[in-house]
Amino acid sequence: MLLSVSLAYVCVWNPPMITEQPTGALRTTLIDSGAYVIILAVCCVAIALRRLAPTTAVVAVGVALAAHVLIFDGLSILAIVACLVAVETCTSRVPRPHAWLLVALGYLGGAVGALRADKLIDPPTPGAELIVLAVSWAFITVAVLTGLLRRRARERIEQALERAEVLAAQQEAERRLAVAAERQRIARHVHDLLGHSLSVIGMQAEGARAVLATDPAAAAEALVVIGRTSRRSVSEVHALVDMLRADVRESPLARPSAQSDGSAAPAGSSPGLDDVPRLVTGARRAGMPLTLDLRCDAEPPAPVGEAAYRCVQEALTNVMRHAASAPTKVRMRVEDGGVDIVVENVEPMSAGGGAAGALDDDTRRGAGLQAMRERVVALGGRMWAGERSEGGWRVYVTLPALPHLPQAQPGQAA
């Protein structure tokens, strides 16, 4: 806009040479030339709007300058500046390949205007045409190069902005994925920390109510187990809340916590294979008819040991909730190749809550198994859970000795 206003101001006071009209009258001022006013207006408006519609602006300037060459004998400041601005706009803003065609027309128009202006040189100089043509094309070439440099700089800025937008979108997507993953992780922790303990409490409470009148000592022992398990659950809830408040590098889950039998885990450690016997002992004290067959010939990494512990814990929790009185077997084989876990009970669990002794009619089915499957697949293991052909329920888990990223989707079973 500033260029257009400046050009209009300068050109008003610097008119071109005016040819004689057929009538012989000579127009000597710019104001008297209606054609020049129109050409000036078209050029200024086109230059002002060249960023919004570059192709239309260049074409309008070209038509106006063609009329300028036909009407006036000599060049003017308007013709020179408008031609250079139009050529620069071609290479900087007009889409290709139209830009190169318009640039070629600009070279042609500049040559015609320069050669017509050369006729006004008096006296004629030999070779003046070539000099004028070379000078005009040199100015046009400078304008072309300037436009190319500006286009390149603008494209770099646009590419940088596009990359910034893509990066921002990617970061937003990663943030959402991280939030979703964190929610899943917290849900698994809540399920692992509280599901087993609450199942034990519920089972002991049912047993205490059943024997309260006939065997007060057994009821009192059940209440002791309930109290101990409740305190452990409260401690685990506090640890989980602290984990949500604390920095990720200082996870409260690594602090000592009580086991199912009330004993404390080693300081600074997560539950592992060594804690499975304590878990089974606690389930037996809760009244489950449970046997353990554990053979350990190797020492797996800590993540594998913790995952194995959590799988056994979740499987026993499901038995407590759906078939509390069913005899249950836990078989674990720890070798150099990995860990194999089988948890099975010999009585079928019914759809309405399981065998006799089931705690409740749970309508939220599959959440624990899904969390277990996600934990197993995250380490590159496999899991199968379903009814046995001879009756009952079986959970089979295999974990590799060296955990790796999964190749299958979390929902797939072996």
Image (spheres, helix red, strand yellow):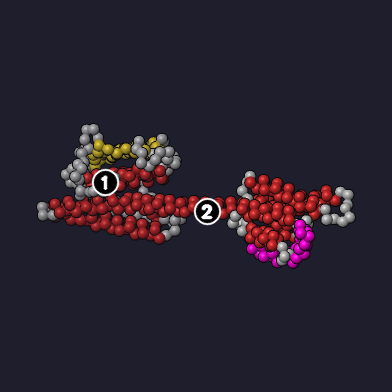
Q: Residue at x 34, y 52 (%)?
A: 187
For the question of whether residue 118 can be seen, the reply is yes
Q: Secondary structure at mark 1?
A: loop
For this rendering, which residue is in front, 299 or 26?
Answer: 26
- Disc nearest the viewer among 2 and 1: 2
- x, y (%) of residue 178? 43, 52
Q: Is 280 in the magenta?
A: no
- x, y (%) of residue 224? 22, 56
Q: Secondary structure at mark 2?
A: helix
Quadrant holding the C terminus: top left
The amino acid sitting under disc 1 is Arg
Farthest residue toward the front? 23
Q: Which residue is mark 1?
A: 365
**Residue 349's image quarter?**
top left
Label 2 crowd bin: few (<14), some (14–19), many (20+), radius 10 Å: few
Q: Are marks 2 and 1 in contact (CB under 8 Å)?
A: no
Q: Residue at x 33, y 53 (%)?
A: 190
**Residue 305's image quarter?**
top left
For this rendering, which residue is in front, 11 or 367?
Answer: 11
Quadrant holding the N terminus: bottom right
Q: Which span of residues is magenta-colored?
A: 1-29
Q: Which residue is mark 2?
A: 165
Alpha-carbon distance for marks 2 and 1? 42 Å
